[in-house]
Amino acid sequence: MKLTTQVIIQNITFLNPLKMREKSTIKNRLAFSLAGLYSTAWTLSFAAVFWGFNSKNFSETALAQPVVPRDERLVPPPPLRVPPPPPANFNRDINPAFRNRPYRLGPGDQISVQVQRFPELGFTGAISPEGVIVLPLIGTVNVRGLTVEESQQRLRERFGQFIKNPQVSAALLVQRPVVVTVTGEVARPGFYPLQTPQLPAALAAAAGTNPTAELRAVRVRRTLPGGAVAEQVVDILTPLQTGIAPPDLRLEDGDAIVVPYKQVTPDRKSDQDLASRYSLAAAAVPVQITVTGEVSKPGFYTLPAGSGRISAALVIAGGVTGKADLRAVRVRRTLMDGSSVEEPIDLYTPLANANDLFDFPLASGDVIVIPQLDASTKNLDYDKALVSRSTLIKPRIYVRVLSYASGGLTSFYVENGSRFLDALNNLPANLADLRKIALIRFDEKQGRAINRSIDAKAALEGNVSQNPMLEDNDVIVIGRNLVERIGYVINTFTRPFRDTLGFILFFEQLRNGVTDLFGPSRNDR
């Protein structure tokens, strides 16, 4: 009994430390867990407090911005340029007579006819000029003016007389050419068969449109079955400018395409440039023109292909004269319908304001008229010296000089825009003759010679009024007695001259035949 009690006591004594050890381990684990939770909570609280502090003291943009100097910051790219939208009613008002209607068969169309279960009854070929096709078993069938569906129904009815519930199918293989008329501002007006019945194909068949074509108002005219004429206006320039699809207009037999004329003005220069470069523009060809008026060599001229401009016309005609009024140049043109138009062109204002010259495009048959400057007005707003330095004027003028010192009549060229002293510099002259000089010029309006006295000595001293600008075919007479003799001859025998040519021939005769005028006595000098 005692032994057993001792054993139990020993066991209890041995187990107590184990239990205490287990309790201590549990406490330690619990302590570490609580410490970990406490540390985590404290860390999260601190992070939240620190984040709130940052948000109050630092802006969000400051935390995300790179360090870049202000003057080197990137500038946002400019927005892309988008073409302006077309007008709301652009090619929307399509005449019902021009809407895509079912295609009507006619002579020249190639069709295919198939009959199920009976391939030997089929047909593939062109419709005859009479508008019929010939099939086995049923013979000839007239399909002129029918749609494909209507012709299919007619064939089904004909085959139904011999076959129970025939299954017939018809299809259009090749469409016949459509014959249309193209007229107006195109290179080659006429009648054209079109395999593709579209407006661009018609303009291409006529070799393209002219630079003066009004592409915003091309007209398509169609004669309806009742005899009425329907018209559709088509704008083909706006699609070129905006990139939108052109109108889908299918042409039919007998349609007429009229390309109207449009006056070319400086404000439409961009439209005209585009119209002359697009795919349907007419190819450049030689241009035959007439140049008349105040030009050096009036006449008929042919401008090479690609150079049909008014500036080239003036250059080939030798340039305008000093009497030309470049503010009122006119171009006369005969249109296809027989009517004529006249285009006023101002060539002076671009020179005076240093602007781009509007180089008017010419066409074969054009007549360029260069008017004369009105001498009855002062023309204070017209700088003749400026015009004389331009490339539009005749580069040189012809001047004649009569004097005893030179031994008779002397002729030479001077630059256009030259003045009296420029012609006098290279001529021998006595000092006594400098105050007795006459400038003789033919006035076409008055039909007579104008005699103006000039004091060359005063001109040399700087008197501008005595140093006038010279014009083509001017005659300078030096010497008192010679001035009196020439004046007497002109006023007595040859006034008025018929024209400038008569004025020139008079002085040429002096060169060749009137020798006594140049052999005066010593006292005459």
Image (spheres, helix red, strand yellow):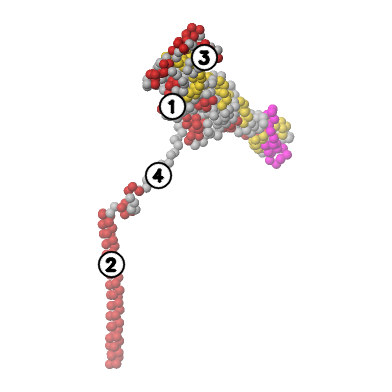
Q: Secondary structure at mark 4?
A: loop
Instruction: Give the alpha-carbon distance from disc 3 to disc 1, as whole Å.
Output: 36 Å
| Highlighted range, magenta | 112-131
Q: Secondary structure at mark 1?
A: helix
Q: Residue 287: percent from the left, percent from the top?
A: 57, 26
Q: Are marks 2 and 3 in contact (CB under 8 Å)?
A: no
Quadrant holding the C terminus: top left
The residue under the point 48% across, 23% down is: 414
Residue hosting label 3: 507
Q: Observer-nearest residue: 95 or 516?
A: 516
Relative side of 101 to 40, left or right? right
Residue hosting label 1: 351
Residue type, numbered disc 2 = Ser
The residue under the point 29% across, 52% down is: 59
Number of other residues with Cα within 10 Å of mark 3, as a class: few under 14, some 14 to 19, many 20 or more: some
Q: Observer-nearest residue: 295 or 483?
A: 483
Tag 2 or tag 4, which sits nearer the N-term?
2
Q: Nearer the viewer, mark 4 or mark 1?
A: 1
Q: Residue 267: percent from the left, percent from the top?
A: 45, 28
Residue hosting label 2: 39
- The label shown at residue 77 is 4
Q: Secondary structure at mark 2?
A: helix
Residue 323: in magenta span: no
Quadrant holding the N terminus: bottom left
